[in-house]
Amino acid sequence: MTMAPAPLTQALAQVIISSDPTADAAAMAAARTAIIDFLACTIAGAGDRTTGILAKAVGADLPGNAILVGTSRRTDPLVAAVVNGYAGHVLDYDDVHSSVRGHPTTVIIPALLALAAEREFTAEEMVASYVVGLEAMARLGLSIGSKHYENGFHATATLGTVGAAAAIAHLTRSSVERTAVALGLAATQSSGLRLQFGYDAKPYHAGMASRSGLLSARLAAAGFGGAPDFLDNPVGFHSAYAFGADNLAALTQNWGVPWQIVAPGLTLKAYPCCTASHPVASLGIDLHNEGLRADAIDSITFTYPPGADAALVVSKPTNGIEARFSPEYVFSAALIDGALRLDHFDDRPVQPRIMGLAERASRRHDGSAPRMSSDPTTRFVILDIALRDGSTITRRFDGLPGVTDPTQKFRDATADNPAFAEIPSFVRSMSNAADLNQLLALLNQDTV
């Protein structure tokens, strides 16, 4: 089938395959840090009950040489991409990127790790391809505008398919033509709805996007046909998903200058719950440390800019998984316990001692504030607390809290398991193919 030239899609394909992030030390260092953070989340998530359910359902007993992180098992690469992507996101502890408005690493790295089962490449090539995949995913996020997410799509899933396919196209040195087809095949598998937040299906979005990206790149490389103009076609990606809010110039303009992994960069989570709840978590811990106690509080009000709590879909959670998406519960747990741990957000019923305070909290929106967008400066929360003695407390948090060095987070998430102890330092220095094989061996161990 003869197609007219597709300049936007071709331009994106060209920058994907011709980029060289290895020349940017800051980008490569940031990528290695992000990989350490992702591996912490994935090793911890490998032991989650629902990860086991998924692994069995998708056929993890199939033969293959792709590792399942945090286990001694190997399986088919497409299955491994699903399971490792799920494990990386199941605890909602993995990184977030404002341009994506979602979680890039848990989609891209599992696809690259799965590819290592069928193709030899170096650790440095994997890191560089991750940077390119994240760039493509973030640029697509910037180009599609805010209505995509606000209308109900989960950007981790919908943009992640393209990000994963882009990373693999870069690593395999695909042609412009085959890359354009791969991106289009990924885009046609783009799916994921925010209505699944609080359910097992939410982290499944990350796994299915990783698998779809890997499969799309595989199909295109094998000569499988697909539309080469997913950006240019009048019934293409943006006409279907942008709802008129698109900014196509953002796709390639100043590509890699700086790399999106450098600026605005990733937020590495300090707490194992939805990113949008982190500001109130930090405020709760601060007030705990200042001596405020729950029994002194009459009511709590959170004020957000319009759209800032779109992901916080639960006000009255019944279990810890739902509680990840409840600022009322997150704040209350942080204030009462002075910390947020993984066991605050497992699948057990919520704790009455925490719900007792959470039920005194409510939300409102400041209609005069700019609507929250990919610009992190539009994110804030104002906390107003009415105390039972008649006094009040007001606090404000702008932006997002996060960690800069995930080494301690890695120790905590892996329970200081000596089998994984050398991974953070190893990831920071790995370079050749032997190093990548050594990393895979370190990851291919049981958590218990």
Image (cartoon, rainbow, N blue to C red):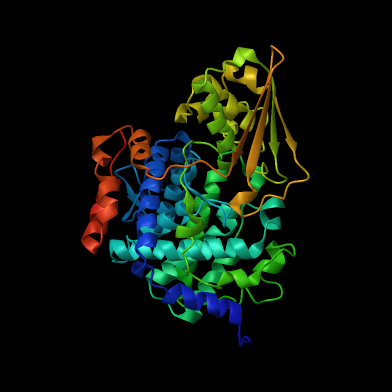
Residue 11 found in image quarter: bottom right
Asked whether, in this view, residue 380 is left or right of residue 422, the answer is right
Asked whether, in this view, residue 433 is left or right of residue 173, the answer is left
Image position of 195 with respect to 23: above or below:
above
Q: Which residue is the extreme one toward the front? A: 391
In front here: 282 or 360?
282
Which residue is rendered at x = 62% and y = 85% of the image? Answer: 3
The quarter in which the C terminus is drawn is top left
Q: Position of residue 112 (x, y in %)?
A: 39, 60
In front here: 30 or 237?
30
Image position of 413 with respect to 387: above or below:
below
In front here: 103 or 306?
306
Q: Which residue is the extreme one toward the right? A: 367
Asked whether, in this view, residue 92 is left or right of residue 238, the answer is left
Q: Position of residue 76 (x, y in %)?
A: 38, 56
In front here: 116 or 304?
304
The quarter in which the N terminus is drawn is bottom right
Total number of numbered discs in the rendering: 0
Q: Is residue 84 visible?
A: yes
Q: Position of residue 166 (x, y in %)?
A: 47, 67
Which residue is rendered at x = 70% and y = 51% of the image? Answer: 150
Q: Position of residue 276 (x, y in %)?
A: 59, 41
Image position of 79 with respect to 119: above or below:
above
Which residue is rendered at x = 33% and y = 56% of the image? Answer: 64
Q: Is residue 59 visible?
A: no
Q: Which residue is the extreme one toward the left? A: 434
